[in-house]
Image (tube, rainbow, N blue to C red):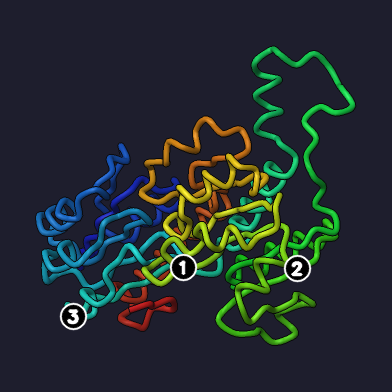
Amino acid sequence: MAKPILLVTRKLPEAIEARAARDYDARLNPQDEPWSTDGAEIARRATAIKADGILGAAGDKLDATCINALPDSVKVIATFSVGFDHVDIAAAKARGIVVVNTPEVLSFATAECAFTLLLMAARRAVEGEALVRSGQWHGWAPTQLMGVTLEKKKLGILGFGRIGRELANMARGFRMEIHYRDMQRLPPDLEQGAIFHDNEDSFLSTIDVISMHVPGGEGTRKWLNAERLAKMKAGSIVINTGRGPSLDDEALIAALKSGHIRAAGLDVYDGEPKVNPGYLPLQNVALLPHLGSATIETRDAMGHRALENLDAVLLQGTAPPHRVA
């Protein structure tokens, strides 16, 4: 029997491409030419090869226009990500196309990234590295680049899901006090002593650091805006490894310039790969290029999870384990 045809939109880790080529008639993207700016290109390629499945990724524009233009042969879309706000779920359901994601395998790596940014922001690592690289460092000085310790600081986690809870575990090792805000309070075995806030005013006015882990969508767009930043303590730190649009860039830039927000660490951006140019001259913000899950182990695990879901639909005719639509 002919193997199912699988369209792979991005270059993936070697082990994942090898498995895809073994089990499918896989049409790979070896140069990693991005098709994400135009969903019509994904639909055009899927139609040309009569794809049975699509293995896409975060950033692919799998909107209603793209999905409605897909050939009838497409049975499943797998996204190489936990988030699926780049996929029009309603359009996929209307077409009878299964959508799957890759949860539970990138939580620790993304929390590591958040904690990396937290340390960079608190200890002024961006400024310190620039000083050394510039050749302008003239040796240790008692008042040089003094940051703040994380010990005994109150870490506020916005969105206490898997990633937020992994971050909390790391922060406990730094003797931080954990606070969180979520839709509802979690059971004690998941809280692990973290303090729940049932309103944003209490949450924002209590914490020294906010780390954002909320999903995308209009409900969270520009959640951290000028009004909410003003409710935070002077000298607070902002970390975002969740979704770029959940942060009001202009409001944060103004708060960083004024000093009301001491420092920030960002791994995601509104409209990425574009970055608000207001951040670029600021030395009190650490900027990473969406590295949250970028470890060898995690990206391999994500790929295998995506293929497990594709196998269920296209090879085994069974329900995929991580279906979102």
Check residue 178 in the rendering and tell me which mark sits there, or answer none: 2
**Residues at marks 2 and 1 touching, judged by CB atoms closer than 8 Å:** no
Callout 3, which amino acid?
A: Ala
Q: Which residue in the rendered view is the most extreme toward the bottom?
A: 187
- Residue 88: where, in percent of width, then height? 26, 69
Q: Is residue 6 left or right of residue 193?
A: left
Callout 2, which amino acid?
A: Ile
**Residues at marks 2 and 3 touching, judged by CB atoms closer than 8 Å:** no
Residue at (15, 58) in percent of width and height: 43
- Mark 2 or 3: in front is 2
- Circle 2 sits in a helix, a strand or a loop, which is it? strand
Q: Earlier in the sequence, mark 1 or mark 3?
A: 3
The answer to whether residue 46 of the structure is visible from this angle is yes
Above-or-below relation of 182 to 300: below
- Residue 300: where, in percent of width, then height? 51, 54
Callout 1, which amino acid?
A: Pro
- Closest to the observer, 251 or 69: 251
Residue at (83, 17) in percent of width and height: 139
- Residue 273: where, in percent of width, then height? 38, 43
Alpha carbon separation for disc pair 1 and 3: 23 Å
Q: Earlier in the sequence, mark 2 or mark 3?
A: 3
Q: Quadrant of residue 138?
A: top right
**Circle 3 crowding by C-alpha within 10 Å: few under 14, some 14–19, many from 20:** few
**Circle 1 crowding by C-alpha within 10 Å: few under 14, some 14–19, many from 20:** some
Alpha carbon separation for disc pair 2 and 3: 42 Å
Check residue 94 in the rendering and tell me which mark sits there, or answer none: 3
Question: Which residue is tagged 1?
Answer: 215
